[in-house]
Image (cartoon, rainbow, N blue to C red):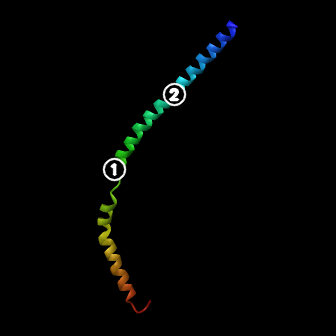
Amino acid sequence: MAEYITLVLWALGISCAVLGWFARQLYAATQMLRVDLSALQVRVAEDYIRYDRLQDALKPVMESLQEIKQTLAGKADK
């Protein structure tokens, strides 16, 4: 009977060690992901312009396209 208890305790100890190692690996991966995500947020903020700034920059182009469209619409040789 004592052998069975010893065997169960060994199995429990090994399974707890494996579970602890796995939990540590998950924690380390989560921390690395957190660092990578904050670096990505900074990069996205630096590399891309906001939609309203883009709209303001493209406003003259869109107006020119509208003028060309109106000119082409008034042409007789469609």
Q: Position of residue 67 (x, y in %)?
A: 33, 80
Quarter occupied by the C terminus: bottom left
Amino acid on which disc 1 is placed: Ala
> Would you place residue 36 above or below residue 72 in this image?
above
Secondary structure beneath dot 2 equals: helix
Instruction: Measuring from the top left, give residue 12's x and y in whole percent.
Output: 61, 18
Q: Name the residue located 56 percent from the left edge and 20 percent from the top edge.
A: 16
Residue 11 shown left or right of residue 37 in the figure: right
Closest to the camera, between mark 1 and mark 2, is 2
Q: Quadrant of residue 34?
A: top left
In this figure, which residue is indicated by the disc labeled 1?
A: 45
> On the picture, is 12 further left or further right than 4?
left
Q: What element carries label 1?
A: helix
* Residue at x-position 29% and y-position 66%: 56
Q: Residue tagged by mark 2? A: 23
Q: Where is residue 23 in the image (x, y as percent from the top left)?
A: 51, 27
- Which of the two labelled residues, at mark 1 and mark 2, occupies the earlier sequence position? 2
Q: Given the current orientation, which residue lies at the most extreme right position?
A: 1
Residue at mark 1 to residue at mark 2: CA–CA distance = 33 Å
Query: CB atoms at circles 1 and 2 under 8 Å apart?
Result: no
Residue at figure coordinates x 32%, y 76% from the top left? 64
- Crowding around mark 1 (Cα neighbors within 10 Å: few <14, some 14 to 19, many 20+) is few
Neighbours of disc 2 within 10 Å: few (<14), some (14-19), many (20+): few
